[in-house]
Image (cartoon, helix red, strand yellow):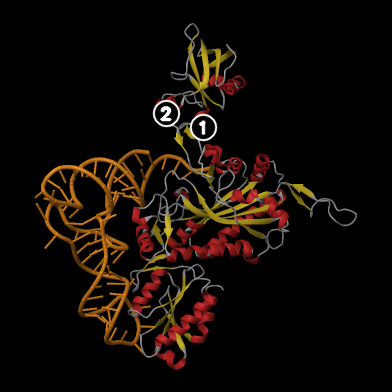
Amino acid sequence: MTDPANTTASPAPKSMDAIMALCKRRGFIFQASDIYGGINGFWDYGPLGAQLKKNLRDAWWQDMIMRPCWGANGPNGQPVRCVPLETRIIQHPKVWEASGHVAGFNDPMVDDKETKGRFRADHLIGAFCAPIDAPAPTTAGLPAFTIVSSTPGEAVTILTDDKKLRKLLGVDGLEPVAASSSGQALFKCEYKGKPVHALFAQVPMETLKAQFGNIPSPFTGKPGSLTEPRQFNLMFKTYVGATASQDDIAYLRPETAQGIFVHFKNVADTTRVKMPFGIGNVGTSFRNEVTPRNFTFRSREFEQMELEFFCHPDESQEWYKFWRDFRMEWWKRIGLAGENLILREHDKDELSHYSCGTSDVEYRFPFTAPGFGELEGIAHRGNFDLTQHQKHSGAKMEYNDTERGEILPNGGRRGERYLPHCIEPAAGLDRGVLAILCEAYTKDESRPSPEFMKFNPRVAPIKAAVFPLVGKDGMPEVADKLHAELSARFWRLGAIECDEKQTIGKRYARMDEAGCPFCFTIDGDTLKDQTVTVRDRDTGGQQRIGIDKVSAFVADKIGE
RNA sequence: GCGGGCGUAACUCAGUGGUAGAGUGACAGCCUUCCAAGCUGUACGUCGAGGGUUCGAAUCCCUUCGCCCGCUCCA
């Protein structure tokens, strides 16, 4: 989330409690496993929420895959080309090794609070020292100093090669005493000027857990700044097959993107797509969040809409900017048009080591205000992922671009082989829904219906409602007919409601809370002149149109 | 992970040791020709869960689950 310091003056934040109450009351969002007391970090969608979410997902699919960027040309002057893909939640475990997810976050990690350095707890090699004439040291006590390394032997090598580090830690003159056994290495050296025996070995986990406050930091040599080893099990573990042994461990994906990289060649080889092109994947992902918080914002199960757009390295910067700008426009057009939406370019020190540009589309949620929360990240990932998968799988990921290379005598091109670069607009579907709910929620005490949901008609779960003003004089029959006509035409996009119960004001109010943009009312005049009133949700205003024009009116408003 | 707050009807909440309540909403009927209007009626509760104290617990104690807030964390 963004530091609130550099934000513009914000309007009074909406009450998250009120939004959550409405979500429950009207069936947008329920707590998962509600009758059992709920389960931390999981939320379900009710009837209106499920349709709202589907409409947002469909909008992404349409505007990113089927007709990318509303039919606009890309920076190369050509229409943008994208194809869909659907990959599994469970992938081969090696996929997550290649992507870096397993290595980075499946081990207990220790942080150094002073330097912000982080390392795997089992990579902390300690030097256990004892005076030269005393019995040989063991790993029972506290290490005199520590080094981050995967093996004791490597730790000694690091020390030997790094004069600066030796000085920092106060050690010098390393000489092996005995051949290193597995997991340990005994050396003679000077520590803070005194000759000692130093046993290099992994700091036992029990020692680290109990004494983390007294163990010297590998970055400063001083104790007191290390944190307790903490398990970052952000990957959901499961077992494939019925035996559930260690060999059968698999993970639920933490992102959909890797499925795309895995199939990059398959798609390129089978669909006649030509560089540049994108592959989109929508699906559920899982992260064992440390702290699920803020309604659905940080859920443990969530849905992503990810596009990986592949292009020639030379064109990657232009495409990065293109996607970044388009994605911002897209969210605006979907209904987040106000000043609560910002595009934020990451600072250099925020970037991953392989990325040469990342932006976030961020929304000012009531619970982040005056700061912002991430809706989507647009990252220039270079060729990092394809390189990783090429390395780990052994499969060749190079693309043969037949539109590049020198011109041959026959007029064709020689072709150029390269690893494409990749631009990744990765959006959170559930976060998008939440942002839309927050943006749509409006409170206006001066209205007969003070609370209402100002959904963009394209995503509104209920597209229109038809009411007979009163339940007699043939009005219900006319309403039923109009309702049937609208349903037949628009059922693919959302619900068309028909309601003759209660007073008209109550029915309008009900639709306002559900975010239905238009209500059509059959009244006495309808029977005489074949017109109905259209009541606008946001203004409460009315106009009369011919009953035969209603369908076209709706189609126009919902952008069909 | 730490600290604070909360949990009673679909929603908002009252009830602090003695028969579980109100408003709103929902539903049915009447009425009603455009904005939660009116009248009548109906339904809706494991008082978050488990245990303890007590003659008796929504209420006191312990445990636990969930949500919210603040720190922390967030590849």
The numbered mark 2 sits on a residue in which chain?
Answer: A
Please provide percent x and percent y for residue B49. Answer: 28, 51
User: Which percent across, then down, holds residue A125?
Assistant: 52, 24
Q: Secondary structure at mark 2?
A: helix
Q: Examine the rendered structure and indicate whether residue B17 appears above or below residue A139.
A: below
Q: CA distance from mark 2 to mark 1?
A: 13 Å
Q: Residues within 10 Å of mark 2 (few under 14, many from 20)?
A: some
Q: Is residue A207 left or right of residue A428?
A: left
Disc sitting over residue A209 in the figure:
2
Q: Residue at x 48, y 49 (%)?
A: A2
Rendered location of residue B45, percent (x, y): 26, 61
Q: Residue furthest front?
A: A243
Disc 1 element: strand
Mark yes or no: residue A194 visible.
no
The part of the image, by quadrant, that contains residue A537 is bottom left
Tell whether A438 sits left or right of A269.
left
Q: Residues within 10 Å of mark 1 (few under 14, many from 20)?
A: many
What type is the residue that disc 1 sits on? Arg
Q: Position of residue A25 (x, y in %)?
A: 35, 64
Vertical side of B66 occupied by A466: above or below: below
> Residue A159's mark?
none
Residue visible at 67% across and 61% down?
A80
The disc, 2 or 1, on the residue closer to the chain's N-terminal end is 1
Instruction: Locate the C terminus of chain A and report the quarter of the image it occupies.
Output: bottom right
Say which residue label 1 marks: A120
